[in-house]
Image (cartoon, rainbow, N blue to C red):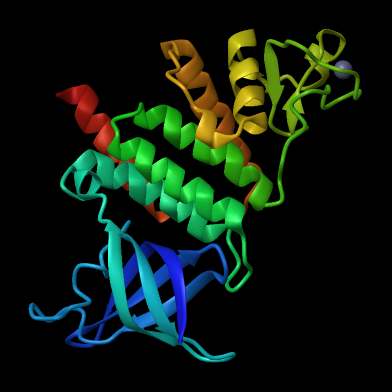
Amino acid sequence: MKKVDALVLRTIDYGESHKILTLLTPTYGKIAVMARGAKKPSSQLGSISQPFTYGTYLLMISERGMGTVAQADLIDSFRKIREDLFKTAYASYMMELIDRFTEEREPSAGIFLLALTLLSYLADDKDPEVLMRLTEVKMLDFAGIRPDLFHCANCGQPVETTIRFSIIKGGPLCSDCQASDERAIWIKPATLRLLQTFQAMDVRRLGEINVGEDVRRQMNKVLRQYYDEYSGVQLRTRAFLDQLHKYELDF
Ligand SMILES: [Zn+2]
């Protein structure tokens, strides 16, 4: 038996009454475990088998095969997220990003802390769009596609500010190299600065950030196209988020 702090990244139903939980733990990394009977109303495992739940889990795990949850103590159910359709969509997106770029059974205290901090911020009503962009920037490292945001992607000289970001070349362009990619995305200097800040910062230090509409739109565009170009992953939760966003605009 192993006792570990864990976050539930996602769950799937298994048979009539069981659930398979994808847990993120600092000590064992990401692991899939069976929660037997978790779908039964009387089950003690019901409340700790929900997405985004944070708890201490007692697990039976072996070298091979799927582990089993013996019991668990709830630390935080993040009820404020699960009871809100929008927050649920944002959390699902952030946890999917983390899930897709995390290997099974590779311990990472850093990624666990990132996930937990992001969910706490979302529950505490921090700006969800800022949190999603922060997740995207941070996960570039774990996905192995970290862009160099401080040097020109064309000539390598230091770039303090820019007005163009080249997806194809994979970073900002200096003033001499603006013409090297005619499809480069126009961005404000503030957009590059925020990307740099997010890349370098300790997520626990995120204060209140006021981000203008232009910068939001540009960050979203740069990150989305960068992921599309380099990550090789289609995110399931993104389509739903896009739908929600449209609905918000129409409303
Ligand atoms: Zn250059």
* Image-based side of 82 in relation to 35, left or right: left
Residue nearest the observer in this picture, 101 or 51: 51
The answer to whether residue 109 is above or below residue 182 is below
Which residue: 43% across, 13% down?
A: 210
* Image-based side of 101 in relation to 125, left or right: right
Question: Image quarter for residue 107?
Answer: bottom right
Question: Image quarter for residue 178?
Answer: top right
Which residue: 45% across, 17% down?
A: 209
Identify the image quadrant of the C terminus: top left
Residue nearest the observer in this picture, 1 or 83: 1
* Image-based side of 123 in relation to 215, left or right: left
Residue nearest the observer in this picture, 110 or 139: 110
Which residue: 67% across, 30% down?
A: 200
On the image, the x and y values in percent for residue 5 come to: 44, 65
Camera sees residue 188 = no
* Image-based side of 138 in relation to 115, left or right: right
On the image, the x and y values in percent for residue 49 come to: 27, 70
The answer to whether residue 128 is above or below residue 24 is above
On the image, the x and y values in percent for residue 150 come to: 78, 23
Q: Residue furthest left?
A: 41
Which residue: 58% across, 61% down?
A: 102
Identify the image quadrant of the N terminus: bottom left
- How many numbered badges does the structure rendering display? 0
On the image, the x and y values in percent for residue 207 come to: 46, 22
Camera sees residue 172 = yes
| Quarter of image, ligand 1 | top right
Question: Image quarter for residue 174?
Answer: top right
